[in-house]
Image (tube, grey):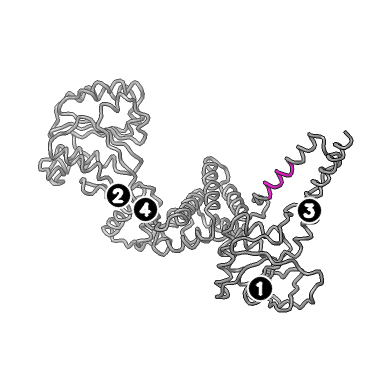
Amino acid sequence: MYQALYRKWRPSSFSEVSGQPQVTLTLLNELKSGRISHAYLFTGSRGTGKTSCAKILAKAVNCENPVDGEPCCACEMCRSAENGDAPDIIEIDAASNNGVDNIRDIREEVNMSPFRGKYRVYIIDEVHMLSQGAFNALLKTLEEPPAHVIFILATTEVHKLPATVLSRCQRFDFKRISPENISDRLKVIAKGEGFNITDDAASLIARLADGGMRDAVSLLDRCCARGTDIDTETVSSAAGIAGTMHLFTMSQYIAACDTSVCLTLINTLHREACDIESLCSELTYHFRNLMVAKTVNDCASLITAAPGEINELKERASQFRLSKILSCLDILEETQRSMKGASNKKILLESAVIRMCAGANSHSEAGEDVFSLKQRVTELEQAISSLQNGTVTAPPVKTPEKQVSVPAEQKVPELETKEEQTKQKEPETPVPEYKQSEYPPPAETSVKPGTVEFTQWAEVLETVRKRDVPLYFMLKTTSAYIKDDTSLVIRTDNQQLFLFITEKDTSHAKELSAAVTAVTGKKYKLRIDDKNGAEKKKKNPLEDLKNKIDSFNNTQEKNQ
């Protein structure tokens, strides 16, 4: 009968145990020196080698010809232990034998001498499943067993064990196995089974196993059933995940705020029998890698991926702001928690992607400009305070949304405003048509004598879209012209653009300057044509409201 790979390739000696040197070296030293404890406690997450080490230890203490503490695996005792018919090695599953009567049977058996070996070894797996009465019945035997008895307790939930049990055992903590160790072990197994596995496929399995060797070998077993050549596509198909290419595509369109393409991609993967919960988990891990690539210069040691993917992760991370990546991680983590027991997980992932795309665009309904929100709150507080003091009798003047006056002479690093236009309007010249319909020209495109229309503005916008999506949406309906061959002037009627590039975050100005230089090969001095700035400043409703309030207060003081 076919034997599963995780059973067939179970380690038979301490040297074959992967990723647990803190355990194997200590046990080997104890075996070589003869200082063997009467009770051991092996704890750690699933698939990290607890039961394997327990069996190796039981085999080693009864081995007829040990070699530096290692079992010889050739004597009669070792062979019977590997076959599972050694009379002196008793394995007990506490999940199904957790009553007081089961422990009483053990208490009666421990007084019996070993049949052939030196020790009678009791391996109690999932020991945290024992009842409280069973623990109480085990305490005395566990504290003072006969000299020929060794207890090895194994559990994944050590916090459920009573303190009285913990204090009677020598404890060993099994850590999650690193992806590198899992990948190396998978290559050895694949070679021994006559299969070909790529490095990328082994790394993907190791990442999916999340530190568990048994899970990794079980997934390799599923991949082997699909063919002798195992690559990342085989692993993705066997595990029911999206695969690396789909994750990069998804994050690309999330950065571009393209909700339609993201939802279409989820629908396509769902039709291809992709597990939605696994896809959400992989997407979470992908954004975790983006976070690391965004914040750490040398991130290769912290990310389990192929060398080519590292460069692609860095490029993709450059399209996001760190705050955006962290926000996406929060949304995905919340979605994963909600998926537990959900009737339709696809809907939850779709809503999460919509929220992620909305948050990437500061002008969308779900991601309004923080500066504008603060301004509106301040205005409301001022209006409420005025009404409470009784200094305003007329109804409040409604302030147009996102209309902030900007002084024409104000200057910021790398970005300066243009002088106010003269009262006499200069003759207009037609603006060349844009090559891409995606960037419609603004309503007004007047060009002064001595200036040249900047025809590469569409290329600059395309470059900005790849580097800074929010800035791209602010500039999408603008145009530009060159003045005196040294300055590039942005023509816009949106006074919010000045605040967005300067007061909100000066990094937007740097991104714009870099995009212009990348397209033209020349560094221009950037300006904003704020021709309506003076008029809007004069017509600012907040100033009118302030003047009315001051006038009203002065009148009241004179009357008093």
Disc nearer the start of the sequence (3/4)? 4
Disc nearer the start of the sequence (4/1)? 4
Using the image, determine if residue 171 lies above or below residue 343. above
Residue topped by disc 3 = 540
Q: Which residue type carries mark 4?
A: Ala
Residue topped by disc 4 = 206
Using the image, determine if residue 204 lies above or below residue 55. below
What are the residue bounds of the magenta stretch? 372-380
Q: CA distance from mark 2 to mark 3?
A: 81 Å
Q: Which residue type carries mark 3?
A: Asn
Disc nearer the start of the sequence (4/2)? 2
Q: Position of residue 444 (x, y in %)?
A: 76, 70
| Residue drawn where x is 68% and y is 78% of the image | 452
Residue 376 covered by magenta stretch: yes
| Residue drawn where x is 25% and y is 47% of the image | 17
Disc 4 versus disc 1: nearer the observer: 1
Q: Residues within 10 Å of mark 4 (few under 14, many from 20)?
A: many
Disc 2 versus disc 1: nearer the observer: 1
Residue topped by disc 1 = 436
Q: Position of residue 183 (x, y in %)?
A: 33, 55
Residue topped by disc 2 = 3
Identify the image quadrant of residue 310. Answer: bottom left
Q: Which residue type carries mark 2?
A: Gln
Q: Is residue 303 visible?
A: yes
SS state under label 2: loop
* In front of the other: 259 or 453: 453
Q: Is residue 162 left or right of residue 64?
A: right
Q: CA distance from mark 2 to mark 1?
A: 62 Å
Q: CA distance from mark 4 to mark 1?
A: 45 Å
